[in-house]
Image (cartoon, rainbow, N blue to C red):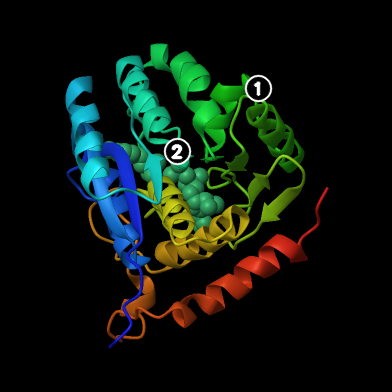
Amino acid sequence: MEQTSPTYRALTIAGSDSGAGAGIQADLKTFAALGVYGLSALTAITAQNTQGVRAVLELPSTLITAQIDAVLEDIGADAAKTGMLSSSAVIEAVAECVQRWQLRLVVDPVMRAKGGDPLLAEEAVETLRTRLLPLAEVITPNLPEAEVLTGSRIETLDEMKEAARVIHAQGPQHVVIKGGHRVEEPVDIYFDGEQIVELRAERIDTPHTHGTGCTFSAAIAALIARGRPVGTAIAGAKQYITGAIQHAPGIGHGHGPVEHFWMYTEQGTPLPTQEQHWSPWFNRAKEQLHGTDTH
Ligand SMILES: Nc1ncnc2c1ncn2[C@@H]1O[C@H](COP(=O)(O)OP(=O)(O)O)[C@@H](O)[C@H]1O
Ligand SMILES: Cc1ncc(COP(=O)(O)O)c(N)n1
């Protein structure tokens, strides 16, 4: 009989982006690109395109809990991620589900869209810190989000490293401070509670970075769901997002989306299902983890 490979499952708990570059849509595309069956629980609906957010409707917390329970009771998830959580009420409901279902969780602490529109109420930052951070296996703040979580200005690599330690002390087991907002090259700082690793990539000169944070955190969740060690999942996600930005289709009039299926469209080959497809990435991921200066 032909052997079937296991079906890995990942759940995204996030907002809908009608432009489909960020939010739930970016997460589901990332899960599909990385060979993981994607589940979704919507927290909010945004009317959004590459130029900005026009309207937001937060969904009732009971409906968010009902979505999570419906998919987990039936299908289950090997890992989960959160994106836009909108308010304290939503965070409370999600945290209760994460605890009850004992989810392996990647938290992308989304606060604003690329154009600056708020996606999290200011009153919710404290709830995020106290309720969700202690439940996070991985957290992936960008520089402005790390500044809010630490209450400090962050510019240099040393300040990013210090911020990673401060955020780690708030509960998450693994912290990645993303460097996409740096003026210099987009170095991400990864701290696992023991060592600090610099994840380096060339800056790609493009306005098309809508959904980069969503895509990066979804890739980490997907690779964790596939059974990768957390450090390898993070370094692999960095390879994946770099390729996705490089191959951005350049659509829309503002910050356009990235290309989630870049590794298939480039070669024009059918979707591979075999694990050896990933090996070039994971070799590069291992180099990133072991070949850089550690402190
Ligand atoms: N212009 C770019 N060139 C290469 N990598 C980038 C670029 N912009 C962002 N990245 C990478 O994309 C990932 C998401 O980072 P960032 O854009 O800072 O997140 P967010 O979308 O949450 O603001 C990080 O790994 C970051 O280093
Ligand atoms: C619904 C939703 N969720 C998240 C983001 C953040 O996107 P980015 O990944 O660019 O920070 C967004 N613009 N819209």
* Amino acid at circle 1: Ser
* Amino acid at circle 2: Asp
Q: Is residue 187 visible?
A: yes
Q: Is mark 2 within 8 Å of ligand 1?
A: yes
Identify the disc placed on residue 152. 1
- Mark 2 or mark 1: whose residue is earlier in sequence: 2
- Outermost residue on the front side: it is 1
In the image: residue 189, left or right of residue 17: right
- Seen in the picture, residue 32 relative to 83 is either above or below; the reply is below
Q: Position of residue 66 (x, y in %)?
A: 19, 30
Please tell me which residue is depicted at 27% across the width and 84% down the height of the picture.
270
Question: Mark 1 falls on what kind of element?
Answer: loop
Q: CA distance from mark 2 to mark 1?
A: 19 Å
Please tell me which residue is depicted at 37% across the width and 35% down the height of the picture.
101
Q: Nearer the viewer, residue 197 or 76?
A: 76
Quadrant position of residue 222: bottom left
Q: Is residue 255 visible?
A: no
Q: Which label lies toward us, 2 or 1?
A: 2
Report the residue marked by disc 2.
Answer: 108
Question: Mark 2 falls on what kind of element?
Answer: loop
Q: Is mark 1 within 8 Å of ligand 1?
A: no
The quarter of the image that holds ligand 2 is top left
Q: Position of residue 146 (x, y in %)?
A: 57, 30
